[in-house]
Amino acid sequence: MLEVKNAKIMYGDFVAVKDLSFTIKPGDIFGLLGTNGAGKTTTFRMIMGLLEPTEGEVLYFGEKIGYHNVDEVGYMIEERSLLTKLTVKELMLFHGRLKSLKKEVIIERLEYWLERFGVSEYKDKKIKELSKGNQQKIQFITALLNEPKLLILDEPFAGLDPINTVLFVDAIRDFQKKGSMVVFSSHQLDHVESFCEEVVVLEKGEAIINGNIEKIKDDFQKRNIKIIGDNIDLKKLKSIDGVIEVKKEKEIVYVKIENNDVANDVFDYVKTCDNIIKYDVEKASLSEIFVAKVGEARG
């Protein structure tokens, strides 16, 4: 288990992270989100033991995390950090030895992941000879090589096509099933929403959203309605108290409302329309909540 307790990190007078708390249990996939400069990278470094909190603490299975835990941690950073003049095999031997792995174990695991990702023929190729997508696969393998108990992934799907994204997703799910703790960051919030149960959203180093995603959606109150039918008067929908926005795209009418109670008033009107074949009330997406909360935090 990883516990962040009232953590604060300062660089001189600048507060990079402020009073941050969360817990990640084995088998959790945890979302750490934020705009650029919000404090995500600092938080990543803190939970890996590379930065010590100015205040508060970070505990890994009840003990203070530090360099002595490095063999159990895997980290894939957003920017590619590969030694491009090395071959894939040479790079893995380098990274594996940093994680205290024996040569034969490194080679065995490397061959497994290369085959799984469909790039076995690149084992003896130099990194610089690979496409960006295949370099992304190699960087991902460096994070998985030591079979980490704590796996930290910063924008792992950046630049990947849908087929290779599925390969990464399956690998992450496998580590989750083994009981690894996965900390996941992405600007593609649909991935976060499909992966994670718990999430923290940082803005200026402070958590503006923290907790279970479904509860966050419930508490947000705002809802979206999708309607398909004939003779729907958009102006009448807009005039209903509590309706925020109405728009039509192709045959679907989208209605944003202040809370679930307004859905009853919208439905009362929709019942008077012809041939209604769809009326769905949905919670706001994580992306909508993210934009709203960041906007509130910025005033």
Image: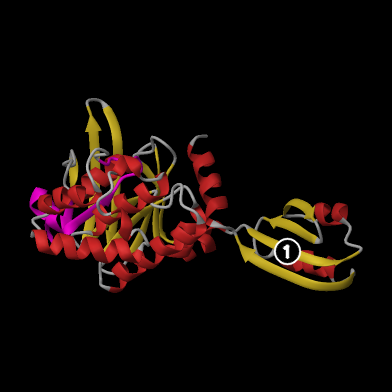
State the residue in front, 230 or 126: 126
Image-based side of 17 in relation to 259, left or right:
left
Q: How many marks?
A: 1
Q: How far across and how far down the image is residue 151, in percent?
A: 26, 58
Q: Vertical placement of 247 versus 25: above or below?
A: above
Q: How far across and how far down the image is residue 143, in percent?
A: 25, 54
Q: Is residue 183 magenta?
A: no
Q: Which stretch did the figure color magenta? A: 58-82
Which residue does the image show at 40% across and 44% down from the upper left? 132
State the residue in front, 167 or 20: 167
Q: How far across and how far down the image is residue 136, in percent?
A: 36, 49
Image-based side of 204 in relation to 229, left or right:
left
* Residue 1 in sight here: no
- Outermost residue toward the top? 13
Q: How far across and how far down the image is residue 226, in percent?
A: 73, 64
Which residue does the image show at 40% across and 57% down from the upper left? 199
State the residue in front, 62 or 196: 196
Q: Amino acid at mark 1?
A: Lys
State the residue in front, 150 or 226: 150
Which residue does the image show at 27% across and 60% down from the upper left? 23
Question: Under tag 1, what secondary structure?
Answer: strand
* Residue 279 in sight here: yes
Q: Which residue is mark 1?
A: 226
